[in-house]
Image: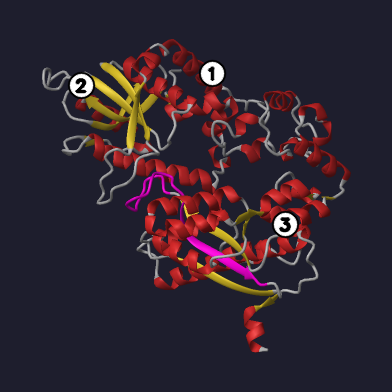
Amino acid sequence: MPMKPLSKSRLMAYRQCPRRLWLELHRPELREDSAATQAIFRTGHQVGAIAQRLYDPDNTGTIIELSPERVADALAQTQALLGSAAPIFEAGFSASGARAFADVLLPVNAVDEPDAPTWRMVEVKASTQVKPYFRDDAAIQAHVARSAGVPLTAVALARIDSTWTYPGEGDYRGLLVEEDLTAEVFARGAEVQTWIDEAQAVARSADEPGTRAGRQCSEPYPCGFVAHCRRDEPEVAQPVHWLPQIRSTSLRAWIDAHPGASLGDVPDTLLSEIQRRVKAHTVSGEVYFDAEGAAADLEGHVFPACFVDFESINFGVPVWPGTRPFQQVPFQFSVHRLEACGTLSHRSFVDLSGDDPSRAFAHALIDACGSDGPVFVYNQAFEAARIRELAERFPGLSTALLALETRIVDLLKVARRRYYHPAQEGSWSIKRVLPAIAPDLNYATLDGVQDGGMAMDAYCEAIDPQTPAVRRAQIGEQLTAYCALDTYAMVRLWQFFAGRQDLGLCSAESVKEQ
């Protein structure tokens, strides 16, 4: 029986895990892609569309329409266009048991040989780095194209330049930068053919490979079959992946060598101090709380105190002039302001107009936080970076913004150093710490938006011109409630860590009513 060609995506699935390839072919209905994976796909399509404009500014090229039902037509159309001298996008080739579609195919010597041009291939990636598996991807593309008889003379990988700033007016020149991979990928033809042969053997097998779940389930990218592959594995009550910051080579090697191990099995000699704390208190079930140390960390911060949280959006393809690819642009904040008497007031900002929210955000933030007192956040690196970026973009606000940054106090640092509850499962996210300290606060009770990912999705829906005004208003209310809970949660964490349970919190509105 002749081999049915395997697509490049199938070969990349094999490179990640043979079981993934088999499931892609034989049990595709079991695949469950996360919202994050879907977002990556959307960004990839956007970058691909812009690449077509950049590589064909005169609009003389051809985009080959792809669909599962018309693969043969796409391959035939590619063959016909190879005799021309214009750019081809999504050019398809099939040879040596594999099939591939090139993002960009550009004629090289079209002026001298208009009837028989040679070609330069460009693979476009919605990433700011050239990742190792991108090189495998390009090697597959090049091998299949050359095996199909394409006179290929060069191969490059185009990635996003994270330092580029969008000038506006739809001008994306400079968004992409190239790295030439010609010599590397041309030298890997035999290696690629080995992958194809091995993948074909897996594809023909009637039995699902028994590959155990492991690091390959998330590297180099998340696999949608994880739930299926782990369904029959014994459930570990305290899994090793609860350990925070698993980075050391020796610890990763031990975990790989002991699949199904429990947290208590890991040798202490392989663990950092914080990892040993997580292990010890998870296994014992005892809460760790250095109350004296936490109070000392927070001592000396005067009132009034502001508790601040931002929500942001990071478009891979910038839409606002002055912003960079994947730059975190804040569109919302919540500020709870606590007075010495326990009076608590709230200010919020959210811009769903679709315009760049940055300048209005900066003005409102400066006004809401005032000019004195600590500014408590939960993960200083995020908010501080956003404030510095705003100061750089808007020099007229720089002094006030940078003064605000100097007032930041990070509650996450206090939590990591002084507190751990076994229910945190190795995480110090505010949603993990809060249930043990303030069980009356629950993100699950919120309507619509319950985490940062949902906030970004809601924001994108709100700024879509097709979204009705009523729905946009509803999203605004949901975002405001979510962000407000984040900052009120910080107030409660501060109260606990500072040992100020004696401070009775009351809203500014209730004080006015009295």
Residue type at the position of mark 1: Ala
Q: Nearer the viewer, residue 288 or 230?
A: 288
- Check the image and report above or below for 407 versus 250: below
- Check the image and report above or below for 165 versus 176: below
Give the mark, 1 or 3, whose residue is nearer the N terminus.
1
How crowded is the residue under tag 2: few (<14 C-alpha within 10 Å), some, or many (20+)?
Answer: many
- Check the image and report above or below for 151 versus 232: above
Q: Which residue is mark 3?
A: 298
Q: Position of residue 46 (x, y in %)?
A: 36, 44
Q: Which residues are magenta?
A: 315-339
Question: In front of the other: label 1 or label 2?
Answer: 2
Helix, strand or loop: magenta stretch = loop
Residue beneath the point at 55% across and 50% down: 382
Q: Which residue is mark 1?
A: 201
Residue type at the position of mark 2: Val
Left or right: 61 with respect to 423? left
Q: Which residue is mark 2?
A: 108
Q: Quadrant of residue 445?
A: bottom right
Residue type at the position of mark 3: Leu
The answer to whether residue 447 of the structure is visible from this angle is: no
Question: In front of the other: label 1 or label 3?
Answer: 3
Residue beneath the point at 41% across and 64% down: 360
Q: Position of residue 40 (x, y in %)?
A: 46, 43
Q: Which mark is residue 111?
A: none
Question: What is the quadrant of the C terminus in the image?
Answer: bottom right
Give the mark, 3 or 2, whose residue is nearer the N terminus.
2
Q: Position of residue 286 (x, y in %)?
A: 87, 48
